[in-house]
């Protein structure tokens, strides 16, 4: 059994090494396309190069991301989703994963019109509302910038990935990780809906090492291994360090209690000092024999300034580990090596003296 497990892990590693190779090739192609589009004689490092970075590559679907859909277009997209959803007709789906009659929601995504397919109970509950996401805070703290490479860990249906994709622009990219096929299919569909060609989806969960697990699709937590559940599905697990060569500048980690395991598998990535946003799940972490404070075994408060969004604590108070995180909360971890966007200017006058 042990040898079989080792062989399966080696197969998983080889498969994702191929994925990394494909992503590197795509990045090289994107860089070459950018170079081909530059005006003759332009230097990427000069002012002309900076102006050029604002030019988006030609889109495959002209202006679809900048206008509202017509009813006819919306019907075509809904029919296209029904064809995708048909493959789940014989799959046991329950709770939030249950399929519903699909519809589209149009909303502002970062800076312009976007749309999201609502095809599951979870999608309706999470994405058909006016809830805000963390992106404005990330931008205000300088954690995500144009041109960044983003790892969206726990991408779910790819909605946050759409916001990140627009924030990083045509010169940036997003790798969206999620272990569940239905989420990946919806994420791909949402990316097409918004012509977001700078998102790559990786169907895998995050852990400290490569492997496989059988989990409940309804629970969507790799900490609940239940091979006898009616909706049990096998998933792949990978460490983020398999993708360290892509040098992400921002990590979002929302993995239902596996956040410490994900960090354990991302030592090389964290050593590169990306900005890190983590949703902390104190009630789920025990499934993995971990506690919230284990996060700081991997994110050093000497190297990061961490701001917290925690009940009964002022929003964005700096967190130094002075109290236990007992409720669901979020950490905004900014590398101290990253220049602050905030500057303070006082009067040039000195007390008791005239200028």
Image (tube, rainbow, N blue to C red):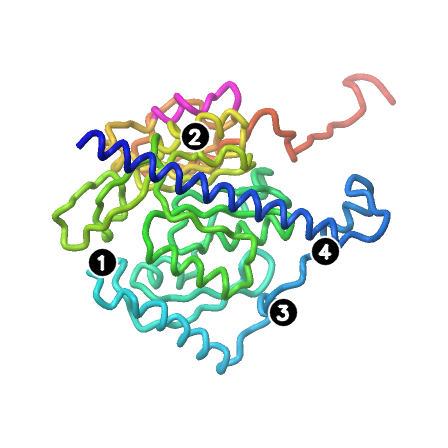
Left or right: 11, with 69 as reference point: left
Q: Mark 1, residues whose alpha carbon is within 10 Å: few (<14), some, or many (≥20)?
A: few
Query: What quarter of the picture does the N terminus occupy?
Result: top left
Where's residue 257, x and y in %? Answer: 30, 37
Mark 4, residue position: 55
**Label 3: which secondary element:** loop
Q: In which quarter of the image is residue 44?
A: top right
Q: Which of 50 and 355 is in front in this view?
A: 50
Q: How far apart are marks 4 and 3 (CA)?
A: 14 Å
Earlier sequence position, callout 1 versus callout 4: 4
Look at the image and give the residue range highlighted in magenta: 293-303
Q: In this view, does 157 lie to the left or right of 136?
A: left
- The residues tagged by marks 1 and 4 sit, at their Cα atoms, a distance apart of 43 Å
Q: Do the residues labelled 4 and 3 touch (CB within 8 Å)?
A: no
**Name of the residue lying farthest toward the left:** 228
Residue 35 locus on image (x, y percent): 73, 49
Residue 311 appears in which quarter of the rendering? top left
Q: Name the residue under label 1.
A: 95
Residue 311 can be seen, yes or no: no
Q: In this view, does 159 lie above or below 88?
A: above
**Between disc 3 and disc 1, whose residue precedes?**
3
Front-lying residue, 61 or 315: 61
Q: Is residue 215 inside the magenta stretch? A: no
Q: Residues within 10 Å of mark 3 (few under 14, many from 20)?
A: few
Callout 4: SS: loop
What number is the disc on residue 63?
3
Q: Can residue 43 be seen in this view?
A: yes
Q: Distance between the residues labelled 3 and 1?
A: 36 Å
Q: Do the residues labelled 3 and 1 touch (CB within 8 Å)?
A: no
Above-or-below relation of 215 to 349: below
């Amino acid at each position: 059994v042990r040898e079989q497990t080792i062989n399966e892990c080696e197969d998983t590693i080889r498969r994702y090494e191929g994925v990394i190779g494909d992503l590197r090739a795509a990045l090289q192609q994107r860089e070459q396309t950018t170079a081909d589009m530059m005006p003759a004689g332009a230097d990427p490092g000069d002012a002309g190069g900076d102006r050029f970075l604002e030019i988006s590559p030609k889109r495959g679907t002209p202006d679809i991301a900048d206008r509202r859909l017509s009813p006819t277009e919306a019907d075509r997209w809904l029919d296209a989703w029904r064809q995708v959803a048909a493959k789940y007709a014989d799959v046991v789906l329950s709770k939030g994963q249950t399929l519903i009659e699909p519809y589209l929601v149009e909303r502002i995504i970062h800076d312009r019109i976007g749309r999201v397919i609502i095809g599951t109970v979870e999608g309706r509950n999470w994405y058909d509302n006016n809830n805000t996401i963390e992106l404005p805070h990330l931008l205000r703290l300088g954690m995500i910038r144009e041109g960044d490479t983003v790892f969206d860990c726990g991408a779910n249906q790819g909605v946050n990935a759409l916001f990140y994709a627009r924030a990083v622009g045509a010169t940036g990219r997003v790798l969206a990780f999620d272990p569940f096929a239905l989420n990946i299919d919806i994420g791909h569909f949402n990316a097409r809906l918004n012509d977001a060609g700078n998102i790559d989806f990786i169907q895998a969960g995050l852990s400290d090492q490569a492997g496989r697990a059988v989990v409940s699709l309804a629970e969507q937590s790799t900490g609940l291994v239940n091979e006898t559940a009616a909706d049990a599905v096998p998933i792949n697990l990978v460490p983020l360090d398999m993708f360290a060569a892509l040098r992400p500048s921002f990590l979002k980690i929302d993995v239902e209690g596996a956040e410490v395991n994900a960090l354990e598998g991302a030592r090389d990535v964290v050593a590169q000092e990306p900005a890190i946003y983590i949703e902390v799940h104190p009630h789920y972490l025990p499934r993995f024999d971990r506690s919230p404070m284990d996060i700081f075994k991997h994110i050093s408060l000497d190297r990061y300034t961490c701001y917290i969004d925690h009940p009964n604590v002022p929003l964005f108070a700096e967190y130094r580990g002075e109290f236990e995180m007992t409720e669901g909360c979020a950490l905004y971890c900014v590398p101290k090596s990253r220049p602050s966007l905030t500057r303070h200017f006082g009067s040039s006058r000195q007390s008791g003296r005239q200028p």
